[in-house]
Image: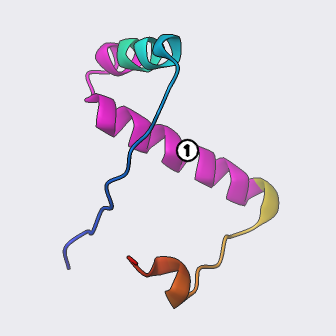
Amino acid sequence: MPVIKTPFTLRLLVSDNAKIRKIAELENRSLNNMIETLVKQKIKEYEQNNGEIVLTDEDLSLE
């Protein structure tokens, strides 16, 4: 089954963007992959502290 990813616009401070780019470069990742990895890490941390986030079909709709 293919993985569906949704594109969106992200606005960052220039300094934050530069720092994330540096981290991505040091870890030999693309900027997109670095941001996706950081988001997944934060979700995992949140769920460890607060329990699993249960999603409904409505949450997963692409509209």
Residue 50 position (above or below residue 34) = below
Give the colour scheme shown: rainbow
* Occupied quadrant, residue 23: top left
State the residue in front, 22 or 27.
22
- Within the magenta stretch, is there residue 40? yes
Which residue is label 1 attached to?
41
Q: Amino acid at mark 1?
A: Gln
Residue 55 position (above or below residue 8) = below
Picture coordinates of residue 40, whole percent (x, y) = 50, 49
Picture coordinates of residue 43, whole percent (x, y) = 60, 53
Q: Secondary structure at mark 1?
A: helix
State the residue in front, 60 or 36.
60
**Residue drawn at the location 76% of the way across and 67% of the way down:** 51
Q: Which residues are magenta?
A: 23-48
Picture coordinates of residue 26, whole percent (x, y) = 34, 13
* Occupied quadrant, residue 25: top left
Q: Main secondary structure of the magenta part?
A: helix
**Residue drawn at the location 27% of the way across and 69% of the way down:** 4
State the residue in front, 28 or 57.
57
Residue 55 position (above or below residue 12) = below
The C terminus sits in image quarter: bottom left
**Residue drawn at the location 32% of the way across and 38% of the way down:** 33
Is 4 left or right of 57, judged from the image as shown? left
- Within the magenta stretch, is there residue 39? yes
**Residue drawn at the location 57% of the way across and 86% of the way down:** 56
Is 59 left or right of 20, judged from the image as shown? right
Is 62 left or right of 2, judged from the image as shown? right
Dot 1 alpha-carbon crowd within 10 angstroms: few under 14, some 14 to 19, many 20 or more? few
Is 62 left or right of 46, judged from the image as shown? left
